Image (spheres, rainbow, N blue to C red):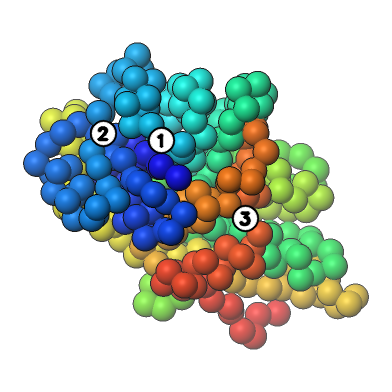
Amino acid sequence: MRVGVIGTGVVGRRVARELVDLAEVDAVVLLAARSKATLRLCDSLGTKASLGAGASGATELPESLDAADVDVVILCTPDETQLDAARLVLSAGRNVVCTADATDTVQALLGLDEFARDVGRTVVVAAAMTPGWSAILARHAADVLDHVDEVAVAITGTAGAACVNRRTQAIRTDTQEWRDGAWVECAARSGPELVWFPDPLGAVDCARGDLSEGVVLHRMMPEVPVIVVKAGRPTGRPRPRWLRRLRPEQPGTSSGETGALRVAVSGRSDGQPTTIVYGLLGTSASSSAVLIAACVVEMADQAPGSVLSAEVIEPVRALSFARDRGVRCLVYDGID
């Protein structure tokens, strides 16, 4: 299998490193502009990696894909670019994996289902630490219970500069929360809560914001009455768009901050009230990269259409894949 990676920021670099270690992957092509930084990155990845032609515009992307001769393309670019890019990749006859996590973008990518079926290709949506791993952990916990009453997700940590900007925007934006069969409007930063994450992070102030976990979890578990999602404020400072254009993030300049998830699923088991709480700890970039690598391995047998990353791979298999690659998935003991 030949895999193309578009975007060589924090997540893109980590994804490339995970992919070159997979036996199922024969080649990793960095579809990026040629520069000293990308050449150094390519050299550091070993013999499986090569530098393809970076597309400066939409019209050049199909030509870049044809020249690289890739089977799958990973989009590690800002959220606002991924819908158009995914459509172009599908049109070029390639499968695509998307890392976008903005609610509107995730919904739009899922809306490519009919188009993807028509061209006989697959688009994997929400392949990132959030909402990818959070959905996998929630699904695993829900499978243990006989009935689920509520899923509560808390997230903290970001990857590169684009991720910091996206999270900052999210926590400043009003959102909707699924309660008792309807979407309820909620103000940004409402419902503040001190959430305890795995050490060394500890307690983090979290609140509501424009996070796509609600949409993803409701699609996977439509019978759950209440879905609550909150996030902590990123520790990094957002960079204005003009500064990002003037001084783009260079490969090797950041590895992202440590991130964590806390996923609490409440319901009943054997007639008794039960709450299962899982945690995940690691940098957002490395956790996302491991999930993307798992999706690349599993999507060979996936039917055409739009699918969530948490639907591509079974939870137990995903957690085993993560454990083997250093992602720490934890269980909270003594939770009532």
Q: Which residue is at a point 85% across and 67% down the rendered structure image?
A: 146
* Among numbered discs 1 and 2, the one appearing first in the sequence: 2
Q: Which residue is at a point 12% across and 36% down the rendered structure image?
A: 35
Callout 2: helix, strand or loop?
A: strand
Callout 3: helix, strand or loop?
A: loop
User: CA–CA distance between discs 1 and 2?
Assistant: 10 Å
Measured as percent of width and height from the top left, residue 211 is found at 53, 44
Q: Which residue position holds label 2?
A: 52
Q: Which residue position holds label 1?
A: 70
User: Within 10 Å of the Cα at label 2, are there few (<14), some (14-19), or many (20+) other Cα atoms?
Assistant: many
User: CA–CA distance between discs 3 and 2?
Assistant: 29 Å
Q: Is residue 329 above or below residue 166?
A: below
**Please, what is the three-letter code of the amino acid marked with disc 3?**
Ile
Residue reaching furthest to the bottom: 334
- Asked if residue 34 shows in the view, the reply is yes
**Please, what is the three-letter code of the amino acid marked with disc 1?**
Val
Q: Is residue 254 above or below residue 299?
A: below
- Asked if residue 196 shows in the view, the reply is no
* Among numbered discs 1 and 3, the one appearing first in the sequence: 1
Q: Which residue position holds label 3?
A: 313
User: Within 10 Å of the Cα at label 1, are there few (<14), some (14-19), or many (20+) other Cα atoms?
Assistant: many
**Please, what is the three-letter code of the amino acid marked with disc 2?**
Gly
